[in-house]
Image: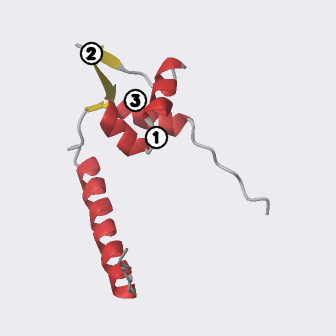
Amino acid sequence: MPTNIITTDDLRDFKMELLDDIKNLLAKQATGKLKKYLKSSEVMDLLQVSPGTLQNLRINGTLPYTKVGGIIYYDSEEIQNVMDSNRVQHGLNS
């Protein structure tokens, strides 16, 4: 099995690509170009969860959804609301 050596230049390039992707996503969100309804696969990518975890979020009522013709859709605003309402902030004891 051949070995690939990753250089600092490779890491720097990866970092720049990742930052560009994040900036593009934030720009789309700011202009409201994100999709209103997301399919399960898109939500799994967005939240970085497995299909089983997504199913559990549906079953226990954490994540609201709509089922149309066998396809499950999630409202992107409701996902953001769930994320905001479950935010945990730890205060600094100073």
Residue bearing the label numbered 3: 78
Task: Compute the Cα span from label 2 to label 1.
Answer: 21 Å
Q: Does dot 2 land on a helix, a strand or a loop? A: loop
Q: Toward which corner of the image does residue 54 lie, by quadrant?
A: top left
Identify the residue at the far right of this view: 94
Which residue is depicted at the point 45% across and 38% down? Answer: 50
Q: Residue under circle 1?
A: 49
**Image vertical order of residue 55 relative to residue 13, above or below:** above
Q: Which residue is mark 2?
A: 70
**Label 1 element class:** loop
Lower position in the chain sequence, tag 1 or tag 3: 1
State the image coordinates of residue 3 (x, y, percent, origin top left): 38, 79
Which x, y percent locates residue 92? 73, 59
Dot 1 surroundings within 10 Å: few (below 14), some, or many (20 or more)? few
Find the distance from the CA under tag 2 to the CA under tag 3.
20 Å
Q: Residue furthest bottom?
A: 8
State the mark number for residue 39.
Answer: none
**Does residue 59 appear left or right of residue 28 in this picture?**
right
Image quadrant occupied by the N terminus: bottom left
The answer to whether the residues at label 1 and label 3 have Cβ atoms under 8 Å apart is no
* 24 and 3: which is toward the camera: 3
Closer mark to the observer between disc 2 and disc 3? 2
Separation (CA) of disc 1 from disc 3: 17 Å
